[in-house]
């Protein structure tokens, strides 16, 4: 199972900063459904509200109109990739150091967290959470003596290794930073006279904000007293954008890494149809992740596009299985077949990935029971064989079906007539800057070396 990681949003110089951040987080809800938080600067101090759950469950009208005052705000919606699912790990994370209130919202994952945390604790730092974002705050504090907060942030980023797109409030300064590899997206925009930052452009669309550009890898943008300053942190690295933003994570109506996500996914589907055509009655997705690739496959192949599986959009993220004997309910409650479309049909299913294969196996078994004559499966990413250290909660290598089985073995396990994964070359044909992407989960070629301090690293067999 893939899980979303985090979304960040920030706005500077807007009278309704908290409310705009609320809507920005609403647009980014798909990136994290575990907790949400907003921090504002009210002119003299930071105010915060954080909670477990979805954005509309955490915030109410009182928070937005009375408690979260100020015209500067940052927000965060979270799924944990490091740190337990606890309120104390919800972000933005806020501290007071000397005469400065600091809050941080972080999307990504550091690969040297354990080393940094141990060193900081040896020098007297006391940690309140188990997430790696707090490590960055302590690094900033360590470098604050005698310097500016901008200098401290740059020094902290030179020590942190891994993926980080950061929004930081330091009193009334807003700071946006992106790691030198550019693993995670971060965008700059404007709405009226206000500057805005977000993980994806869909947040700008909701607010009718103008997308200006991406924050560059290795860039720090500081907004202070209405002035925008850009700093190159001189950590030049080859770009390694996360390809899974385009395959799965980003909303299809977003621009990410300068790419139109919708068009990229359609291109992946068209490439699949070119690589692995098959005579069939129709093409269908497993909603919702496979929809746009399936559209591309159908257009390229000339086959009808159908929705023979219907998703229940009202299933909550915390659906509880009634008993062990009824464990399949967790799959069946979310997606249900249109029975009369299945019998005696030759079906092509298009989806974004296969991680463990158990959920897909259950769904294919149901299609067989309903009389499907043939079931062919096309996957818009190559086989996932290696864990990710940079902020995607992929299973350990031992749980990744493609790491331990051939395509033909997976085909038999799921119960398919044929299975084809898009080739790496085909995937890269679907994006405009193919040299800029991280492919480590497919190839095992990691841009940042394992340091032996992450659970996933210990499990990857390196």
Image (spheres, rainbow, N blue to C red):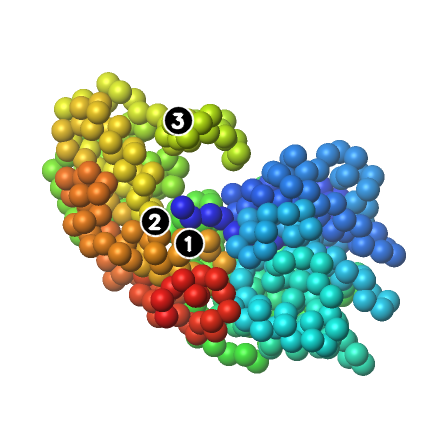
- 131 to the left or right of 50: left
Q: Which of marks 2 and 1 is nearer the N terminus?
A: 2
Label ID, residue 394: 1
Q: Position of residue 27 (x, y in %)?
A: 57, 42
Mark 3 falls on what kind of element? Answer: helix
Residue at horizontal 14 percent and vertical 24 percent from the top: 344
Q: In which quarter of the image is the C terminus?
A: bottom left
Residue at horizontal 40 percent and vertical 46 percent from the top: 1
Residue under pointer 2: 355
* Tag 2–tag 1 contact (CB < 8 Å): yes
Mark 2 falls on what kind of element? Answer: loop
In this rendering, the answer to whether 387 lies above or below 325 is below
Image quadrant of residue 303?
Answer: top left
Residue at horizontal 53 percent and vertical 34 percent from the top: 318
Q: Where is residue 455 in the image (x, y as percent from the top left)?
A: 48, 62
In three-dimensional space, the C-alpha distance between marks 2 and 1, rounded to whole angstroms, equals 8 Å
In three-dimensional space, the C-alpha distance between marks 3 and 1, rounded to whole angstroms, equals 26 Å
Q: Earlier in the sequence, mark 3 or mark 2?
A: 3
Residue under pointer 3: 326
**Residue 202 appearing in the image:** no
- The residue furthest top is 340
Q: Residues within 10 Å of mark 2 (few under 14, many from 20)?
A: many
Label ID, residue 333: none
Q: How crowded is mark 3: few (under 14 residues within 10 Å), some or many (20 or more)?
A: few
Residues 163 and 362: in front is: 362
Image quadrant of residue 140?
Answer: bottom right
- 138 to the left or right of 271: right
Residues 2 and 433: in front is: 2
Q: Where is residue 294 in the image (x, y as percent from the top left)?
A: 29, 40
In three-dimensional space, the C-alpha distance between marks 3 and 2, rounded to whole angstroms, equals 22 Å
Residues 57 and 452: in front is: 452
């Amino acid at each position: 199972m893939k899980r979303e990681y985090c979304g960040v949003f920030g706005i500077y110089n807007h009278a309704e900063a908290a409310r705009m951040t609320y809507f920005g987080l609403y647009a980014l809800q798909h990136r994290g459904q575990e907790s949400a938080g907003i921090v504002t600067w009210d002119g003299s101090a930071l105010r915060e509200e954080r909670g477990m759950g979805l954005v509309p469950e955490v915030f109410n009208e009182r928070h937005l109109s009375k408690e979260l005052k100020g015209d500067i705000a940052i927000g965060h919606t979270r799924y944990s990739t490091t740190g337990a699912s606890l309120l104390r790990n919800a972000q933005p994370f806020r501290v007071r150091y000397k005469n400065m209130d600091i809050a941080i919202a972080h999307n990504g994952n550091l690969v040297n967290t354990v080393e940094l945390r141990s060193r900081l604790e040896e020098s007297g730092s006391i940690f309140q959470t188990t997430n790696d974002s707090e490590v960055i705050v302590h690094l900033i504090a360590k470098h604050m003596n005698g310097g500016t907060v901008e200098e401290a942030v740059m020094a902290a980023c030179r020590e942190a290794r891994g993926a980080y797109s950061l929004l930081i409030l330091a009193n009334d300064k807003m700071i946006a930073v992106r790691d030198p590899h550019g693993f995670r997206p971060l965008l700059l925009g404007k709405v009226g006279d206000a500057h805005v930052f977000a993980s994806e452009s869909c947040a700008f669309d909701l607010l009718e904000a103008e997308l200006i550009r991406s924050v560059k890898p290795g860039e720090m943008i500081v907004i202070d007293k209405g002035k925008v300053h850009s700093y190159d942190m001189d950590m030049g690295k080859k770009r390694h954008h996360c390809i899974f933003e385009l395959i799965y994570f980003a909303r299809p109506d977003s621009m990410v890494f300068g790419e139109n996500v919708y068009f990229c996914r359609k291109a992946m589907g068209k490439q699949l149809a070119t690589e692995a055509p098959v005579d069939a009655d129709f093409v269908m997705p497993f909603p919702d992740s496979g929809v746009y690739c399936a559209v591309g496959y159908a257009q390229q192949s000339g086959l009808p596009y159908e929705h023979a599986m219907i998703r229940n959009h009202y299933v909550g993220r915390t659906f509880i299985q009634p008993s062990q004997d009824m464990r399949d309910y967790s799959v069946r409650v979310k997606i249900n077949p249109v029975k009369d479309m299945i019998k005696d049909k030759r079906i092509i299913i298009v989806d974004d990935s296969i991680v463990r294969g158990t959920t897909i196996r259950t769904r294919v078994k149901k299609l067989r029971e309903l009389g499907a004559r043939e079931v062919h499966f096309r996957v818009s990413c190559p086989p996932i064989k290696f864990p990710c250290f940079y902020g995607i909660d992929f299973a350990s290598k031992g749980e990744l079906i493609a790491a331990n089985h051939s395509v033909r073995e997976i085909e038999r396990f799921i119960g398919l007539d044929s299975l084809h994964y898009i080739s790496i070359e085909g995937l890269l044909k679907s994006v405009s800057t193919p040299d800029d992407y991280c492919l480590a989960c497919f190839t095992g070629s990691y841009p940042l070396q394992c340091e032996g301090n992450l659970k996933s690293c210990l499990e990857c067999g390196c």
